[in-house]
Image: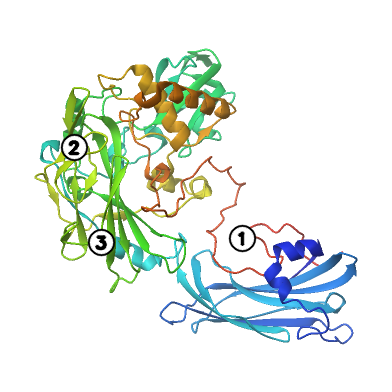
Amino acid sequence: MSHVRRTLPAALCLVALAAACERQPTAAGPLSANLAPDEDRMFSGLAFVRDPDGNPLSGVHVRLTAYSRYNRHGEVWDHYFCDAEGDTDGAGQAYLRCSIPPQYAEEPDGVYLAIADGAYSVLGVTEADRRAFNVQQSFTAIRDRDHNLISDAVELPLARKFAPQLVLHSADRGVRPSPVEIMDRNGDGRLGPEDVLVQVYNLGLMKLGEFRLDEILFNGGDHLYEGKYQYPYLSAIMKAVVIPGYHMAGDTVVPDNPETIYILVPHFEWGEIGSTSPGPWYGTWDEAIGRHAGDPRYTEGTTYASLFRRDGSAAGEVVIQYWFFYPFNPAANRHEGDWEHVNVVLDSPNLATGRILRVEYYYHEEVVVAREPGVDYTVADSTHPVVYVGGSNSACGLSGDGTHGSYPHSGAWPNILDETVDGLGLRIDFDGYRNVELVPDQPARTVFLHDPDLTYAIGWQHFAGLWGYPLSKPLPCETELDLVTGLLVVFVTELPIGGPFAVAASAAVVGLRAAAGEKLEDSNIAAVGPRYHKRWHTTTGGGLSSSPEEPPPAPGPGEIPPAPVAAPGPPFAPAAPWAPLSFRRGPPP
């Protein structure tokens, strides 16, 4: 039980708490009563929490909050509240009580219940039954730590049930979707800050070279990953306090370059640094598959899946977004790091009855929406859409194989670079193989600060750099300057850009793009990760987007907020149940 005093103007109540104000008594009402001297006013609440099938949910954290007004001063009221918290029992019920001292309870103002558990999402709430100083209310909830309004218990089973079957292009030598750890450079089998390289440019767009994170002096000597832009939230930045490269003279740090303004481009790397030709790329692939010969994540392939509701409501279509990572694209538009995806849209998250409404195949800035199985696309074993992986293309006199775009059938596909997909390569049969991994929604920076193991387990999802050597060899019809300016465009338009020169950098790149006109393309630039892709959590014709922008500031020590709970909040409650109260707890002075 706790007591809090709060002073608010009536206007603020009318604006911010309109719904609650409508229920407030203007005179003696059901919550107003005379109190005996020195008698605390006791409030109580009974919460019922069940899943969508009506089964009781135990162990769900619930909060009761009661309010009282006293001492009106013109437009201003003094407010007092008490609250109590507890967990539901085996019957899905929680009975809570709190009290307000009589001197502050002259006009009780409301009593409210809410789910205050970061592991659950609320799908439905009945209208509260308020009688005198008591309230009863029922909640329909699901365990949903990523708060996508889809039960955690069904996410992976759904992703496996509707996982696509892939048919590769025959000339691509069996390159298949891989686990992200295939980009590991230091041989520890993980993907983390030790595997990041930083390509450095001066303001004349001249490349100085590649540097590890611990080879860059930052903020008076800190390494880059120890500053604000720490892994995985590294972003393209222009900094005047960075010195790339140094060596030691005894115990003295000697910088290799002057302290001036640099453009930093963090990235992962495939194979030999700076080697951007198909021959060496395929050689690195063969070596990697050989090292992992006993691991089906490498030899069979890996698919990543992220689930969301199209319109953000509990009744919205369920979208399973499948992402495929190929370490390189050796086609005419060659580049390292190739993320491709399809959307499988379901009518419901019911594992037994959910059915496919449509499949959205994405390739090279375009999409094909397939609605009728057997006509628009093929389905294997009734639930696995077949994806034909591209393909051969040519541009500017250069040709190649392995674009990795996703298509509903083989054949000729006209797009940015006309493409032929033969569907005669390796077939990855998901009917019998279930190597699907979820990409959980974990946006909190604190998860990395307080659990270093997660830096490697899920940190790659938030990596705000490129997934390969930034600039592959330009097409014969392009120049190196075209490619460099295109690289900067990618960072400004698709990735967060930081540092005090961010605005100037953005303006400069926009100017470069306008000057280059249609000539400027990003086809030879390494891909960004799924969370920074413009199609992340979107569907054709609209949808949700949760792509991050500027990395959030790190919270203080010990601050590990749970995910938000979609539950109606009572008046004067904090905006989120885990947020620090903005006013003092304890009896009023």
Within-10-Å neighbours for mark 2: few <14, some 14–19, many 20+ = many
Within-10-Å neighbours for mark 1: few <14, some 14–19, many 20+ = some
The label on residue 162 is 3
Within-10-Å neighbours for mark 3: few <14, some 14–19, many 20+ = many
Report the mark closest to the observer, 3 or 2: 2
Q: In the image shown, does 161 or 484 lie closer to the viewer?
A: 484
Among the 4 quarters of the image, the one containing residue 34 = bottom right
The label on residue 543 is none
Contact, mark 3 vs mark 2 (Cβ under 8 Å): no
Left/right placement of residue 323 relative to residue 239 reads left
Location of residue 161 in the rendering, given as x and y in whole percent from the top left corner: 25, 64
Say which residue label 2 marks: 419
Say which residue label 1 marks: 576
What is the secondary structure assignment of the residue under circle 3? loop
Report the mark closest to the observer, 3 or 1: 3
**Kind of residue at badge 3:** Phe
**Kind of residue at badge 2:** Glu
Q: Is residue 314 above or below residue 437?
A: below
